[in-house]
Amino acid sequence: MNAASDALWARLREAGLVEGDVPPDAVHMPWYVRVMMGFAGWIGALFLMGFVGAAFAVVYKVPASGLVIGALMCGGATALFRAKPDSDFFEQFGLAVSLAGQGLMGYGLGSLFAFDVGTTALLFALVEVALFLLIPSFLHRVISAAAAGASLVVAATDWGFYHFTGAVVFAAFAWAWLNEFRLIRRGVEVRSFAYGMTLLVIGQLVMLAGARAINDAVLGHGRHAIGGAAAPWIGPIVVGIVFVVVVWRLLARQRVAPGSGPGLAALAGALVVAVVSLKAPGFGVCVAIVLLGHAHGNHVLSGLGIAALVAYWSWYYYSLEITLLEKSAVLAGAGVVLVLARLAMNARWPRAGAKGAGDA
C-alpha cells in the first residue's frame, strides 16, 4: 500500500473504526472471470438441487420434512459462506443452496400451520432475519432483508393492515439510508438492509401502488381492513410526512438553515411532493430514492429511483380514469410548473444555477 493508504489506515485505527495492521493489497479478479465463476456456482447448485429433489421426494409426501431439509441446506450454505468468504464460485453456489433451502422451509412452514398465511409469513420472516445475521454475504443479506420485509407485509396484509404497510416500509427505508454514515461500525449490515428495503419499497409502493385488483385479492378473503374508510388515506399521509423528514434531515446534513431561502424553497417543494403523494404515494417514494442517492453519491440508488419514477408515472398515467385530453392537459400543466420553478430558482439563486449548469 502507498503512503496515503497507510495514513488513512492510521486515522481509521485512531478513530477505533479498524483494528490491526495495514491489510495487504487485494488482488482483484477481472469481472468476466467473476461472472463465469458465478454461473458455474449456479450450475453446480442446480445439479445439487436436482439430486436433492430426486433423493428427498419425501418432502412432497411429508411436507413438514421440508423444514428439516431446508434448515440443513441453509446451515450448509452458512458454513460455506463463512469458510470461503472471498470466493465468487462458492458465494454463488452457497446463495443458490440457501435460496432452495429457504423455499423448502417456507413450504414446510405453510404445511405445518395448515397454510395460515399470517402465521407462516411471520415465522418465515424470523427465518430470514436469522439468515441476515448469520450469513456474511452482502448480496445474501440484501435478499434476506427484502424477503423478511415482504413476509411481514404479507402477514400484516392477512391481519388487515395492508394500507399501513407501505408507509412502514418507506419509513424503514428512509431510516436505513439516513443512518448509513452514522452507524459506521455496522455499515455493511445497514447498507444491505437499506438496499433490501429499497427493492421492497419499489416493489410495493411503486409497482403495486393503488392497484385495486391486488387490494381486492389480498383483502377480499373475509377479513376487513383495519381503520375503516380512513385507512386508505393514513398510509399516503405518513409517506408524505416521512418525505418531509427526509428533506429536513438532508438540509441539516448540508448545514442549510430551514429558515434560509434555499431551506424554505426545499421544504416548500417537499410539502408539494407530500401533497401530491396523497393521490400518488409512489411519487414521493421515487423522489426520495433519487434525493438520497444524489446526497450519498450513490449512482446505483439514483438509477433505481429514476427507473422507478419513470415506471410509476407510466403506470399512473394509464391508470387515471380520465380522458386522453384531460391527461394531456395535466402533463402540460405539470411541465409548465416545472419550467417556471426552474426559472424562479435561477432568478433567486443565479450563482447556484450557473454552477449547476456547469457541473451538468
Image (cartoon, rainbow, N blue to C red):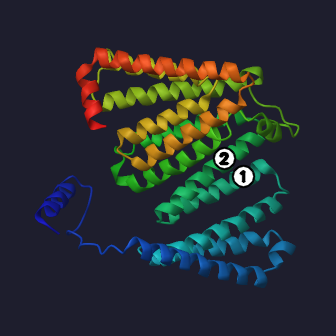
Q: Quadrant of residue 155?
A: top right
Of residues 237 and 155, the one nearer the viewer is 237
Question: Relative to residue 331, is residue 157 drawn left or right?
Answer: right
Q: Is residue 222 above or below residue 200?
A: above
Label 1 element class:
helix
Residue drawn at x 69%, y 55% as measured from the top left: 123
Name the residue tied to disc 1: 121
- Please determine whether, in this image, residue 350 is positioned above or below residue 46: above
**Residue type for callout 2:** Leu
> In the drawing, does residue 208 fall left or right of residue 260?
right
Residue placed at 82% from the left, 62% from the top? 111
SS of the residue under disc 2: helix
- Amino acid at pointer 1: Ala
Residue at (69% x, 51% y) in the render: 122
Q: Quadrant of the C terminus?
A: top left
Viewer can see residue 85: no
Of the image marks 2 and 1, the number of the one nearer the N terminus = 1
Say left or right for 224 vs 331.
right
Give whichever of 220, 74 is nearer the camera: 220
Counting from the top left corner in percent of width and height, residue 258 is at 34, 19
- Give me the residue at 43% from left, 20% from top: 339
Task: Say which quarter of the image contains residue 29.
Answer: bottom left
Observer-nearest of 271 and 74: 271
Q: Which mark is residue 305?
A: none
Estimate how packed mark 1 is, as few (under 14), some (14 to 19) or many (20 or more) residues with alpha carbons within 10 Å.
many
Q: x and y percent of residue 150 in the render?
A: 65, 49
Residue 167 location, x and y as percent? 60, 33
Calculate the distance from the C-alpha at mark 2 to the C-alpha at mark 1: 6 Å
On residue 152, which mark appears? 2
Q: Is residue 238 visible?
A: yes
Cβ–Cβ under 8 Å for marks 2 and 1: yes
Q: Position of residue 185 (x, y in %)?
A: 34, 53
